Amino acid sequence: MYKFAKTPSWLYLFKPPSEKSPAARYKKMRMNMVVITSIVTVLPLFFMFVVNSWQYYKSSKNESLASLQVLEDKTRHSIELFLEERLSTIRFISSAYSYEELEDPQKILRIFSVLRTELGGFIDIGLINDTGTMISYAGPYTLLGKDYGQQPSFQKAILKGQYISDVFMGYRAFPHIVLATHHINENGKGWIIRATIDTSSIDEIVRSMGLDSRSDAFLVNSDGIIQTKSLSHGKILEKCTINLPQSTDKTQTIEGVSSSGEDSIVAFTRVKNTDFTLVTVVPRKSLYKEWHSLKVDMLIVFLVSAFLIVITIFKISKILIHQVQVADSKRESAFRELQHSQKLSSIGRLAAGVAHEINNPLAIINEKAGLMGDLMEFEPEFKNKTKFMDLTSAITKSVERCRSITHRLLGFAKRIDVKIELLDINEVIKEVIGFVERETLYRKIDLQLELKQPIHLISSDHGQLQQVFLNILTNAINAVTDHGVISIETRSEEDGGASITIKDNGCGMNAETQKRIFDPFFSTKKELGTGLGLSITYGIIKKLGGEISVESKENEGSAFTIILPKEPLITEEEQ
């Protein structure tokens, strides 16, 4: 035996709706359609947005880091060039001038004047002999005769031939660096040219990097002491707030947090022939601002696209669900019509049998009643003759009424032949009005005619249409009160047919009565009606290929509309 697998719980959301209310069923169907279609269409778009964002992020990150490294290298090179240019100038002075010339105060002053004018940044310059004593000096301070023999500038210049110091305050009480070169002439005599440079010139080089107000760049020495001005990472000669790894000649980048707490990218590289490291701190948002701008644009495009997709799905689902509703309504209407036709067919066959069986006893009753009347007619001394004659007359009238009913039942059961002929529907209406004219005049009913002239001639059954109009008109007369209004309107249809509307301002019907108005033996007149009139009317109209409908409101009236085709849908066999 086969066993069906249990439905996964996650599929319950998409199960066919089981609510009894059609509105709730269609609402849930529409919701499922909108949700599923939106997921299927928007999800790939979302994945594409994420993948593209990630690709653009990596590309933008690589480009931004490459640009930062290039800027770092250029600035470092400018600083190296600045220091080397001044160091070479001092080295040239040591080689071009003899010790005796540099010892001359006028000569050293003239050299200092040229350096300040042509290169700038020099604070002072002096000549130190091989014992470390300042022999000659040009500058704003009184340093002549000062002993530099134990200072690093003298020791390292003697050892390496040249020296660039860290930034320090010294006697000058402002940040500066010392450049020193050692020279030995052909006689073996040595001396040192010592010059100091203002660090503001190096600050200008750093500021020329063109960073935004949230970024920072400065120099630190190998101990992490800040050498030039910094915007937010400490003052000159203070410990830098960023812990840097060992710097190299190649620019490196690391990710860190700035003093303001922002996620930042730190680029750093060592300045050649010095103890300096150039540090550049750029906030991540500033460095990746192009990617952030692109991400926002992509997000806007994604959201707008998703919104348009959902709106389109919402509108399309509304149209589709409406079409499904219309199709379901037509299917249900056709199903009800089929049920009604089957019911009429069954009752028709039953009615035909009943009418056939009743007609025979009725004929006997009628004959016996007539015979009784004849016998009483020829018997002058018959006791209570008048009373019996009235009784036999009543029997005969009842038999006639029963015959009328059986005649209608046979008509309902299609036992009466159909005769198709070309008809002017207006003339048929006028003939039927003649049947009820006396009653309308008696009750002073306003009978209004709006007959289309000329109207299409149609092929149909004259007698059965008379019966149809008479049934509806009789019901209208019964529905209105005295002085009521009944209107009859005829129109030509575009397909060559004709339509008739019989409207009254009578008692009207409720919704439940309207649903059963064409059912056999359904009557609102209780024992005064057979309940077959409108059923037979419905059957005749359908047999002639027409349509009949009713609109009614309680206490406002009813309107029956009949649409007849140009040619009836009846085969020769049916006729």
Image: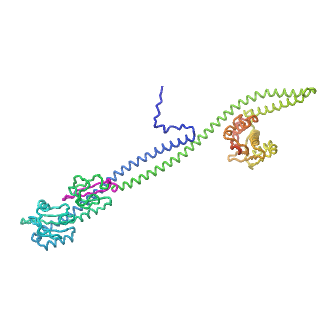
**Which residue is drawn at the image coordinates 41% and 48% (left, top)?**
48
Magenta-colored span: 261-286
Q: How many marks?
A: 0
List the single residue furthest toward the top: 1
Residue toward you, 225 or 411? 225
User: On the rendered structure, is 296 left or right of 112?
Assistant: right
> What is the quadrant of the C terminus in the image?
top right
Q: How is the rendered protein coloured?
A: rainbow
Q: Residue furthest right?
A: 380
Image location of residue 309, percent across then percent down: 48, 48
Residue 422 shows in the view? no
Vertically, is 108 above or below 494?
A: below
- Residue 137: in magenta span: no
Residue ID at (67%, 35%): 341
**Is 90 displayed left or right of 410 in the figure?**
left
Residue 393, image x and y in percent? 85, 31
Taking the image as shown, residue 183 lies to the left or right of residue 314, namely left
From the viewer's side, name the closer residue of 563 and 501. Answer: 501
Q: Is residue 192 above or below residue 337?
A: below
In the rendered image, the residue lying farthest to the left is: 187
Q: Quadrant of residue 281?
A: bottom left
Image coordinates of residue 376 in percent, x first then y, are: 90, 27
Magenta span has 278?
yes
Q: Position of residue 394 (x, y in %)?
A: 84, 31
109 or 241, nearer to the observer: 241
Nearest the eye: 382 or 325: 382
Residue 157, picture quadrant: bottom left
Measuring 88% from the left and 29% from the top, which residue is drawn there? 387
Q: Residue at x 9, y 71 (%)?
A: 100
User: In the image, is 434 to the left or to the right of 545?
Assistant: right
- Mark yes or no: residue 428 visible: yes
